[in-house]
């Protein structure tokens, strides 16, 4: 049975201070990645659909200095950066063409991000092609990479600034003073109210409005956009879905557990060997009685054979102690790693359990729900485009009418007696 592939779009938020960590990861500015399966030799294959030539914070300052965006009214620790992460199971790319297919796929995903965030508001967009999927690498017997896209952008909304009561011209109070591009994560990602088949708002038993989370709608739009671009063989994932990482974590836990058992066996073997040395009571007693003290001296005389035996025993003891110490240290490290992966795995399973439970109980209902959401989203998008087109046409018509009016005014002025007299006087001079 073929495994189902899921499209995933999720959003991470960052402040000025915290964005640097994401930047180092996305742009591969770290010298090493000990906690990740990053193949540094393959980093050259990462694809930038939009490259940030400075730091993310410097790019933000540049946009602020040019007046293209505004942080007016925001706290110092406000969330200024959104990171959109687009992903599909690695198996999907492996079966559809690998690296070249992934490049084309995520180029379309980048254009989707431009549509969502505004092209001018995107700071960086990079496809990672250097992270190894250990589970699939084991399955296929060759290196399989986990292709995914990181897009860092500013969550910008158009905001009308009104004249306040402090304005001297009372007629202007409450009217629009200026329109700014405000950075605002909360306003960018507002939840939408659920509507019934008649287009009326839906409320729960307590009378509260039933809302669709904005990130869930992002998932819908991403799936629909990529489907419309001709990409098939996957379904819409759930917000926060980490099935790809679950598989990889299970593999890592299995391998770490195997390594732990292997090292534990080695330690037991070494301890057994060490204990066998200690059981040689006669040899130990002989060692204790080796040599005789020289008269009038603290030095001990040894027979050549006794000296060689003592040296050999000492070497074996030192080596055994060192090996046992190193193996015990590795056991502790591996136990910590296994505990970490198990904890992370349990956390992800807990977050995803409702979705998988729903799929198990009523897959058709879940499918119908998403299908209905996609249809409404597409209808709303078409209506939005129609209104935008009408607005553009109206502005164009108004501009043409203004130009025609200006042309008629100039023509009228040229035909007036005053204008003709002034022109005649100029020519006479």
Image (spheres, rainbow, N blue to C red):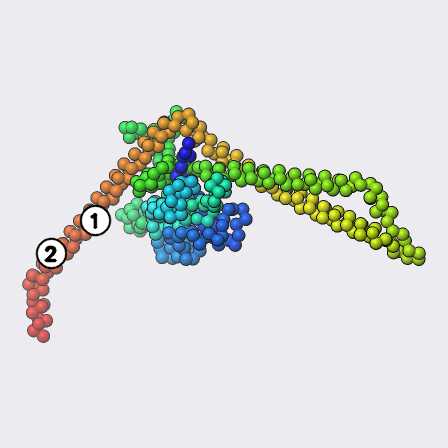
Q: Quadrant of residue 236?
A: top left
Q: Residue at (49%, 50%) from the top-left corner?
A: 39
Marks 1 and 2: CB-CB under 8 Å? no
Pinpoint residue 352: horizontal percent, then vertical percent: 46, 33
Instruction: Residue 342: give its label.
Output: none
Q: Quadrant of residue 342?
A: top right
Closer to the camera: disc 1 or disc 2?
1
Q: How far is disc 1 from disc 2 in space, using C-alphas?
A: 20 Å
Q: Which residue is mark 2?
A: 408
* Label whose residue precedes the other's in the sequence (1 or 2): 1
**Considering only vertical position in the picture, is 167 above or below 266?**
below
Q: Quadrant of residue 336?
A: top right
Q: Which residue is mark 1?
A: 395
**Considering only vertical position in the picture, is 150 above or below 407?**
above
Which type of secondary structure does the marked residue at label 1 adopt?
A: helix
Residue 132 seen in the figure: yes
How dense is the environment of label 1, judged by Cα within 10 Å: few (below 14), some, or many (20 and up)? Answer: few
Residue 185 seen in the figure: no
Looking at the figure, which quarter contains the C terminus?
A: bottom left
Pinpoint residue 219: horizontal percent, then vertical percent: 37, 38
**Considering only vertical position in the picture, is 393 above or below 65?**
above
In front here: 155 or 409? 155
Residue most toward the bottom?
429
Pinpoint residue 250: horizontal percent, then vertical percent: 52, 37
Pinpoint residue 345: horizontal percent, then vertical percent: 52, 36
Q: Residue at (34%, 38%) from the top-left corner?
A: 232
- Left or right relative to 278: residue 102: left
**Count of number-bearing discs:** 2
Q: Residue at (41%, 55%) from the top-left corner?
A: 52
Q: Residue at (7%, 65%) from the top-left corner?
A: 420
How dense is the environment of label 2, judged by Cα within 10 Å: few (below 14), some, or many (20 and up)? Answer: few
In front here: 71 or 112? 112
């Amino acid at each position: 049975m073929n495994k189902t592939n899921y499209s995933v779009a999720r959003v991470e938020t960052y402040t000025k201070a915290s964005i640097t960590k994401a930047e180092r990861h996305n742009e591969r500015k770290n010298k090493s990645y000990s906690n990740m399966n990053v193949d540094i030799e393959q980093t050259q294959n990462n694809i930038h659909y939009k490259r940030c030539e400075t730091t993310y914070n410097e790019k933000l300052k540049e946009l602020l200095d040019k007046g293209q965006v505004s942080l007016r009214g925001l706290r110092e620790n406000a969330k200024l950066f959104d990171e959109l992460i687009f992903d599909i199971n690695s198996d999907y790319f492996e079966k559809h063409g690998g690296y070249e297919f992934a490049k084309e796929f995520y180029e379309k995903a980048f254009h989707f991000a431009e549509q969502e965030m505004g092209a001018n508001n995107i700071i960086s967009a990079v496809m990672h092609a250097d992270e190894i999927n250990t589970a699939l690498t084991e399955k296929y017997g060759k290196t399989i990479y986990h292709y995914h896209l990181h897009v860092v952008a500013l969550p910008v909304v158009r905001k009308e600034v009104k004249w306040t009561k402090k304005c001297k011209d009372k007629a202007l109070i409450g009217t629009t003073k200026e329109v700014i591009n405000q950075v605002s994560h909360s306003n960018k990602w507002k939840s939408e109210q659920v509507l019934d088949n008649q287009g009326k708002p839906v409320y729960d038993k307590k009378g509260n409005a039933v809302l669709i989370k904005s990130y869930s709608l992002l998932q819908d739009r991403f799936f629909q956009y990529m489907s419309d671009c001709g990409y098939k063989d996957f379904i819409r994932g759930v917000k926060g879905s980490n099935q790809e990482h679950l598989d990889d974590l299970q593999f890592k836990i299995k391998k770490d557990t195997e390594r732990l058992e292997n090292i534990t066996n080695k330690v037991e073997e070494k301890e057994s060997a060490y204990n066998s040395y200690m059981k040689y009571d006669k040899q130990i007693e002989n060692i204790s009685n080796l040599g005789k003290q020289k008269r009038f001296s603290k030095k001990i005389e040894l027979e050549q054979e006794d000296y060689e035996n003592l040296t050999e025993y000492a070497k074996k003891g030192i080596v055994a102690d060192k090996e046992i110490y190193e193996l015990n240290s590795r056991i502790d490290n591996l136990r910590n790693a296994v505990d970490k992966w198990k904890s992370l795995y349990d956390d992800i399973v807990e977050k995803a359990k409702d979705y998988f439970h729903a799929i198990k109980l009523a897959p058709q209902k879940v499918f119908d729900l998403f299908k209905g959401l996609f249809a409404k989203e597409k209808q709303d998008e078409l209506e939005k485009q129609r209104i935008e087109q009408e607005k553009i046409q109206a502005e164009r018509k108004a501009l043409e009418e203004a130009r025609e009016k200006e042309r008629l005014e100039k023509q009228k002025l040229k035909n007036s007696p005053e204008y003709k007299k002034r022109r005649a006087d100029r020519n006479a001079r």
